[in-house]
Image (cartoon, coloured by chain):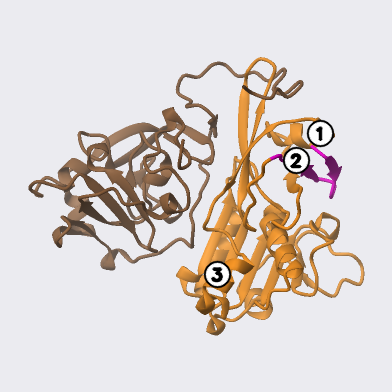
Chain colours: A brown, B orange
Amino acid sequence: MSVLSRGFGRGRSRPADDRLPPGQYDAGDAFPVLSAGPTPHTPLARWDLAVDDGTGTRARWTWEEFRALPHEALTVDLHCVTKWSKFGTRWEGVAVDRLLQDVPDPAPYVLATSDGGYTTNLPLADLTGGRAWVVDTYAGEPLAPEHGGPARLLVPHLYLWKSAKWLRRLTLRASDEPGFWETFGYHLYGDPWREQRYSGD
Amino acid sequence: MLDNRAETPRVHRLVLDVPGWSGHLPGQHVDVRLTGEDGYSAERSYSLASPPEEPALHLLVERLDDGEVSPYLTGEVRRDDEFELRGPIGGWFVWSVSADRTDREAARRPVQLVAGGAGVSPFVAMLDHHRRLDSPTRMQLLYSVRTEEEVLGRDVLGPETTLTLTRQAPAGWRGETGRIDAAMLRRRTIAPAERPRTYVCGPTVFAEAVASTLVGIGHDPSTIRIERFGSSGESS
């Protein structure tokens, strides 16, 4: 049961848009930036990306090695828990399926860890099957640091805090332990279409 | 809604009576949901500008002319009107006396606040809370604002606050002017050697610039917390 606000929204043209999940608005051309701390600037010579199977590092790529992996181009809509959505964003990156292909019997959950200490948790099933990528290119250009460059996770079917910026490590785990924002009351899973913003949604 | 008054030419102070409010920590925000008569609804986040000791909740809402929610909240909502509110939300960008009592090691480190424009809202709550409970924690605020008329939270800000006026300063102004840069941070904020807990809140570009400059003058990135409002979003 909603409390109605007299006259709110009157006269505003807003064609129904089935791309917009509940409670979201279209940010248009803007690409807002949010992060919990300062933007890290790790030199590419010191950058690497690792996959840990829970017992230790099972795969590791330097920047050059990562750039040489097969990249896919994708165009996706983004949904941030702070309520903005952005349609038709163009990215290039490596499918997480490719990064995990040499890990036998991977555990069912993943913790993504970033430069600066940020973490987020996801079920493995949401990172595989062509639903998630590690991207290094946005709109045809190298991914800018404030948007997560050199490389970030991109899981477009979940709220954007799950798409960890400045990604450095994927760790497979037996249980779904909360990451950074999840510890501070944000939803463990974060499906924008079910409006899973906060714990208990 | 208990009161809706202009705090400055662009910002209104909304005073809300929320039955059953569970209490909050300074720095937390709420989600406001407005629903029109046709069922259309929109939600935005606003930081709480009042401390937990204050029974009414205060929001400082900046009118964004191309916004959808802020013109309604600042222009249309009147005393006794109702709307939906959810919160408190957020556990990262917070500071409280009780947390300092629990974590003695952190409590020895001073707190530096850096605000841009309406980003001062959560800091008004922190400073008010700090004062009412007579906290021993050293706390300072550097507040970047366009003009003196646009200063928010005047009744709370005191000698711990340094203003820098970025657009226009009154005749005889002896304080800081211009945007926050490395030299001003060195001059007017707690030095890296004291390992302050630093909180930065403001528009995206402001927060990004201040945080990078703080790291540049020697602050450990892990000691800096950021809250921003997006370039197209409304204040959070």
Q: In this picture, is A22 found above or below B145?
A: above
Residue at 79% in and 44% down: B15
Q: Chain of mark 2?
A: B
Q: Nearer the viewer, residue A129 or A27?
A: A129
- N-terminal of the pair, mark 2 or mark 1, is 2
Q: Chain of mark 1?
A: B
Same chain, marks 2 and 1? yes
Q: In the image, which is nearer the foreground, mark 3 or mark 1?
A: 1
SS category of the residue bearing label 3:
helix
Q: Which residues are magenta?
A: B1-19
**Does any portion of residue A95 appear in the rendered image?**
no
**Does any portion of residue A89 appear in the rendered image?**
yes
The residue at which mark 1 appears reads as: B75
The residue at which mark 3 appears reads as: B213
Q: Is residue A45 left or right of residue A105?
A: right
Q: In the image, which is nearer the foreground, mark 2 or mark 1?
A: 1
Q: Nearer the viewer, residue B98 or B209?
A: B98
Three-letter code for the amino acid on which mark 3 is drawn: Thr
Which of the 4 image quarters holds residue B51?
bottom right
The residue at which mark 2 appears reads as: B63
x and y percentages locating residue A193 in the rendered image: 42, 28
Q: Is residue B105 left or right of residue A56?
A: right
Q: Chain of mark 3?
A: B
Q: In this picture, is B134 found above or below A91?
A: below
SS category of the residue bearing label 2:
loop
Examine the structure image and report whether residue A22 is included in the region drawn in magenta.
no
Q: In the image, which is nearer the foreground, mark 2 or mark 3?
A: 2
x and y percentages locating residue A95 in the rendered image: 22, 41
